[in-house]
Amino acid sequence: MKGTCLCESVTIEANDAKEFEACHCGICRRWGGGPLLAVHCGADVVITGSESIKSYASSEWADRGFCVNCGTHLYYHLKHSNEYIVPLGLFQSESGFRFKQQIFIDKKPDCYDFANQTEHLTEQQVFEKFGA
């Protein structure tokens, strides 16, 4: 899979991953104005255009990258596993994604719902699963 930021200064390439999740945590909602729809791409990710990337340590265990030129959100990076979680929208030419799960479901505000049938993980379950 290959994706770019809006200005195409940054490119992210990852192995095929056809499932995505929605994160309802307060940080993701503040970061993007709504839930983050993202693909777990693992650690085997090739990112070009590093001179255009700014990283922000949003927690002790993760940082978030964005393009300094156009502001596109590029990734959520788990420090302990080196895993990159990339916004679904970066992969414009890809198709066939399946909405697998919603995380931090206990933090989701009442003002929206997804109709898809997905797995639901609470904040506690997420921390237990990822060891953060």
Image: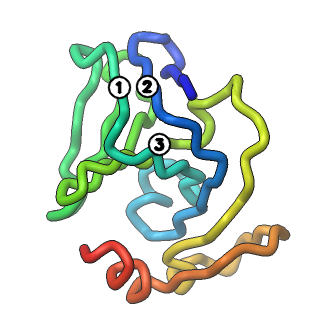
Quote the CA–CA distance across marks 2 and 1. Answer: 6 Å
Could you say whether the residue bearing mark 3 is in a helix, strand or loop? strand
Mark sitting earlier along the chain (3/2)? 2
Question: Which residue lies at the image location 52% right of the left edge and 64% below the top edge?
Answer: 23
Residue drawn at (43%, 68%) of the image:
26
Residue most toward the left? Answer: 60
Q: Residue at x 37, y 33 (%)?
A: 45
Asked if residue 120 lies left or right of residue 24, the reply is right
Q: Amino acid at mark 1?
A: Val
Q: How is the image coloured?
A: rainbow
Q: Is residue 123 left or right of residue 127?
A: right
Tell me: residue 66, above or below residue 30: above
Q: Which residue is mark 3?
A: 86
Marks 3 and 2 in Cβ contact (< 8 Å): yes
- Per the image, the residue denoted by label 2 is 12
Q: Earlier in the sequence, mark 1 or mark 3?
A: 1
Residue 68, image quadrant: top left
Q: The C terminus appears in which quarter of the rendering?
A: bottom left
**Nearest to the observer: residue 52 or residue 71:** 52
Compared with 46, 76 (above or below) is: below
Q: Which residue is mark 1?
A: 46
Between marks 2 and 1 in the image, the one whose residue lies nearer the viewer? 1
Q: Quadrant of the N terminus?
A: top right
Mark 1 lies on a secondary structure that is strand
Quarter location, residue 118: bottom right
In space, the residues marked 3 and 2 are separated at their CA atoms by: 9 Å
CB atoms of marks 2 and 1 within 8 Å: yes
Which residue is painted at 49% across and 77% down in the image?
104
